[in-house]
Image: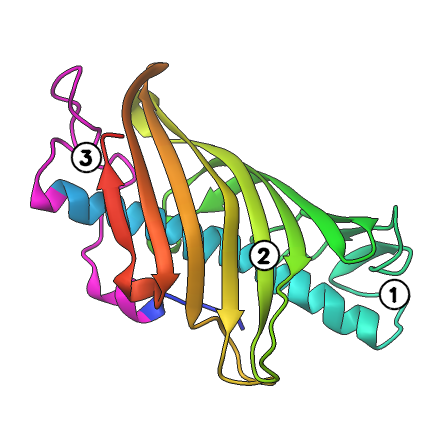
């Protein structure tokens, strides 16, 4: 099951189109201006990147670690080339029912992996299917708590939208943490900054940051950087 760290938040937010409003001027963001509604929609969009996209990729990665832990060399979900923790090994999602079909996991060195995905992806509310490209570097999160587990990620990605809109997003460090104990699903804590730049017909029209410092629901949106 997909680990939706923000499912309650997204369920409470209004459904928005990926168009995210009308472009009304060179200084206005694509959500239609610096209004409370615009900020609300922009936050929803960035939350969807953090949850639907990045957390979904971590779900695929954790499935791979589970299969690897069983010492299996064959899988109906992955094409497997070497042990997951063996430098140079590559695992590729082959399952037709996965939203991440074609995603690859390459082991760079012990304890570090590069995950790549390129393809059409449903973002907000599992709708709005558009070309998405993302590269995620994954490392295990180091903690002194026996109950705490998680992953430290570095993010670089881009996405097309309708109407000539595109966006790029990145993070030098975005950490997903589960403090509820081994065996529980999802991540209840996040730390780090997720940046996004928005373009209309190749012109940069907005640049913003969503900062996480604990509960995902308490993240802070800053725009117009």
Q: In screen coordinates, is 216 left or right of 142? A: left
- Asked if residue 105 is positioned above or below residue 156 in the image, the reply reads below
Indicate whether residue 146 is drawn in magenta: no
User: What span is in magenta?
Assistant: 8-37
Instruction: Tell me which residue sits at (14%, 41%) in the image.
Output: 38
Where is residue 61, by image quadrant? bottom right
Residue behind mark 2: 152
> Which of the marked residues, 3 or 1, is nearer the chain's N terminus?
3
For label 2, the SS is strand
**Which is closer to the viewer, label 3 or label 1?**
3
Q: Residues within 10 Å of mark 1 (few under 14, many from 20)?
A: few
Q: Nearer the viewer, residue 215 or 34?
A: 215
> Which SS type dominates the magenta stretch?
loop
For label 1, the SS is loop
Q: Which mark is residue 74?
A: 1
Q: Quadrant of the N terminus?
A: bottom right
The answer to whether residue 135 shows anywhere in this view is yes
The answer to whether residue 104 shows anywhere in this view is no
Q: Which mark is residue 119?
A: none
Instruction: Tell me which residue sits at (89%, 60%) in the image.
Output: 83
Instruction: Tell me which residue sits at (51%, 58%) in the image.
Output: 175
> Where does the image place residue 89, in percent across and percent down from the top left?
87, 50
Residue behind mark 3: 31
For label 3, the SS is loop
- Asked if residue 22 is positioned above or below residue 43 in the image, the reply reads above
Q: Quadrant of the C terminus?
A: top left
> Which of the marked residues, 2 or 1, is nearer the chain's N terminus?
1
């Amino acid at each position: 099951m997909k680990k939706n760290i923000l499912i309650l938040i997204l369920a409470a937010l209004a459904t928005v189109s990926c168009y995210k409003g009308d472009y009304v001027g060179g200084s206005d963001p694509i959500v239609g201006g610096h209004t409370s509604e615009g900020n609300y929609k922009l936050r929803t969009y960035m939350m969807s990147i953090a949850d639907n996209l990045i957390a979904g990729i971590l779900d695929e990665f954790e499935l791979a670690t589970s299969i690897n832990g069983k010492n299996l060399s064959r899988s109906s979900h992955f094409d497997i080339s070497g042990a997951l923790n063996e430098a140079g090994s590559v695992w590729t999602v082959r399952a037709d029912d996965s939203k991440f079909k074609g995603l690859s996991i390459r082991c760079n060195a012990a304890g570090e992996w590069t995950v790549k995905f390129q393809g059409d992806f449903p973002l907000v509310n599992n709708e709005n299917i558009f070309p998405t490209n993302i590269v995620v570097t994954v490392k295990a999160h180091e903690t002194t708590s026996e109950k705490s587990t998680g992953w430290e990620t570095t993010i670089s990605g881009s996405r097309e939208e309708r109407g000539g809109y595109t966006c790029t997003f990145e993070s030098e460090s975005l950490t997903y943490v589960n403090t509820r104990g081994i065996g529980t699903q999802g991540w209840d804590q996040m730390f780090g900054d997720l940046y996004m730049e928005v373009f209309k017909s190749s012109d940069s029209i907005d640049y913003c940051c969503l900062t996480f410092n604990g509960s995902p629901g308490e993240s802070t949106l800053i725009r117009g950087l």
